[in-house]
Image: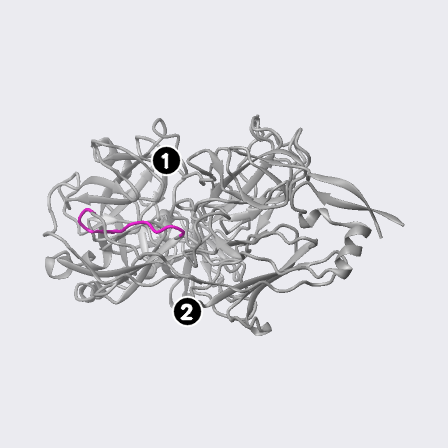
Amino acid sequence: MRFLRLAAAAAVPFALVSGAAAATRTSSTAVAAPRDVHGFLLRADEAPADTFTRTPSFAWKPVRGASRYQFELSSTRAFASGAVLWSSKTLTTPAVSLPMSLPWMSGTPYSLYARVRGIAPNGSAGTWSTPFGFNIRWAAVPTPTSAPTGLLRWTAVDGATSYDVWLLDPNKVISTPSNVADEREYYTFHQGRSWSGAVHWRVRAVRARYGLAGGRARNGLPIASYGPWSPTYTATNPTFATGSLKPTQATSDTTSTAARQSAHRLMPAFAFTGDTSLGGRTAELYRVYVATDKDCVNVVFRGAVVGSPAYAPRLTGPLALPQGVGAVDEARAAFLPDGQQGKTFTADNLQEEPNESLPPDTTPITSGEDDSPTIDTAVGAGGAAQGGGAPGAATLSTDGVTLGPPIDLWDTDWPTGRYYWTVVPVVWVKGAPFTAALGQGASDGAAAVTIPNASQLAVGDQLQIGTGANMETVSVVEVHGASVAIAPALKLAHGAGEMVVRVGSELEYRDLEVPQDACQSGRVLTFGKTSEPAVTRENGQTPFASGLSPSGTLRSAQTPKPAFYGSPLVSWQPALGAGAYEVQWSKVRYPFRPAATPLLTFGTSATLQLSPRTWWYRVRGLNLGLPAGARAMGWSDPAALVVAKPKFAVVPTKR
């Protein structure tokens, strides 16, 4: 009886052997163990390595007769079920991108192991490969770089999504998404060199955890998000400079001064000098404002109140400022802890929270959330890309991901578009006496009252309403014109004209100037903000892509338009400021129209499920320090690849 046998023109790729012929052959011939199992970051053919700074991808030589592969990752060479961190039985390409972050583990020689085996079309399993051992650890710790007075600055670490800074003198750890931190603890309420002359600190890189339940792997192994601490560093500061308050520079991955403005890829810190207002009043506290206009009216970022000659936003929040006069004296003899700043007001009596005190945006990450219906991404009313299929919207949950307050800035069209920043002096004052009369009567159970001069009140104020036996105490929840929301609701009825008195002696922190006046006086500098595109190609030419060649061998891209059979694995370098990534692919380079639902990932590689033809793909980072709708960073330039049909011949055979 005659049968048809599929034979590759070169080596027979596993995916080409199917149907009755494949089942007949593999039933009598065992699937061999895969060879050359190895890890890589960007290309499957990169120099061999056994230590990686972030979660690697894995590849191996394809096995004749295998229709799919089973892959396992374990913390022991025995691959006991309790040690397996991740596994898959559905791989159809001899390469895999992991959907999870791996723990920092190093052994003698190894602490993590990967293995793979082929599965025949009839379901029979082949022999396991020799385990590939490897370690995960940072290649280096951050090291100090030059910084202005009042700031700490260090080298950015590849793959880090934030940094922890251990301030040794107050024994306090703070977190920041950038490579800068201010020294507010050392200066606030004590600006003498005995406090700030020497700052001892350590820093470590942090990377976001993903693909984990409760911060643990499938087998329950805890996975830390941070790397090792640096050695102890010492920063020295000169005597605090007095005189007119003025900004000097913004600094992060680059520096912007009056003479040289730059676009920053990371949220910058802001350095200034002096302590005297436009009116000649000295102050020991300061606040930075960032606006989109040169009049500094459209403020888009409000800094926390600090006593240092520099400010850098923090994920861990502002200092807990003293709330009473006696507490100020205590603060002058101690380092302040983190906490709420209390009542802070602009010079024109608006109560504003600093960005550091705002809640994080936990909205799930959504693909294409900022794409408008332009020629680049023509999206119809139903969400389908016109002329490019019907892609849906992908979502990526932020559950388990550490998110902080919104302390980053939107991109500007640098150098035409820019931000304007200034610093204003802040003073603390005792809450002014407040006595008023109810403008209207209020019934028992009322959750709001009418007070004609309510603009002098602030959220958190305690009010006594009424007198004698008819008096009760409530707190201000919200103020809208003359209407004051209170808690708890009134227990008694009160008539119009009844007395309202603010009680307590909490301190208030008030700006001495509005940002507009500070900027118009010349106390203003500019800078730009631009997101770093993900790097998807080597030297801007050859994509970081690997997979099965049309002739059945494992290969990495060698040309600007490589060809693969099946599903190629694409990688990219981490982008500064990115906490997640979006991948899109299109049938044409321009106009780029997503041809399917985009892929969202916290990792730096992905396997693309593509049909045979020429494709263009692009990658962008997502900045989780911005609110939903503004997280998308710049796209990489589209990279080309060809998904080819296999090369094979039909050969008659006998049985």
- Label 1 crowd (10 A; few <14 / some 14-19 / many >=20): some
Task: Give the image location of residue 193, x and y in percent.
Answer: 11, 58
Question: What residue does disc 2 label?
Answer: 107
Is residue 352 visible to the viewer in this orientation of the structure? yes
- Who's the residue at 42% across and 62% down the image? 474
Look at the numbered discs 1 and 2 and tell me whether their residues touch, using CB distance below 8 Å.
Answer: no
Q: Residue furthest right?
A: 1
Q: Secondary structure at mark 1?
A: loop
- Frontmost of labels 1 and 2 is 2
Residue toward you, 506 or 382:
382
Q: Say which amino acid is labelled 2.
A: Gly
Above or below 554: residue 378: above
Which disc is residue 298 wearing?
A: 1
Picture coordinates of residue 69 (x, y %)? 65, 57
Q: Is residue 153 magenta?
A: yes
Give the crowd class for mark 2: few <14, some 14-19, many >=20 residues within 10 Å. few
Residue 361 in magenta stretch: no
Q: Quadrant of residue 473?
A: bottom left
- Stretch in magenta: 147-159
Secondary structure at badge 2 equals loop
Would residue 495 be visible to someone looking at this image?
Answer: no
Name, please, the residue furthest toward the front: 654
Viewer-side residue, 18 vs 574:
18
Q: Earlier in the sequence, mark 1 or mark 2?
A: 2
Q: Which mark is residue 564?
A: none
Q: How is the image coloured?
A: one colour
Q: Position of residue 355 (x, y in %)?
A: 37, 49
Q: Is residue 435 left or right of residue 21?
A: left
Residue 429 point in image, percent of width and height:
23, 54
- The amino acid pointed to by label 1 is Asn
- Left or right, residue 590 beside residue 143: right
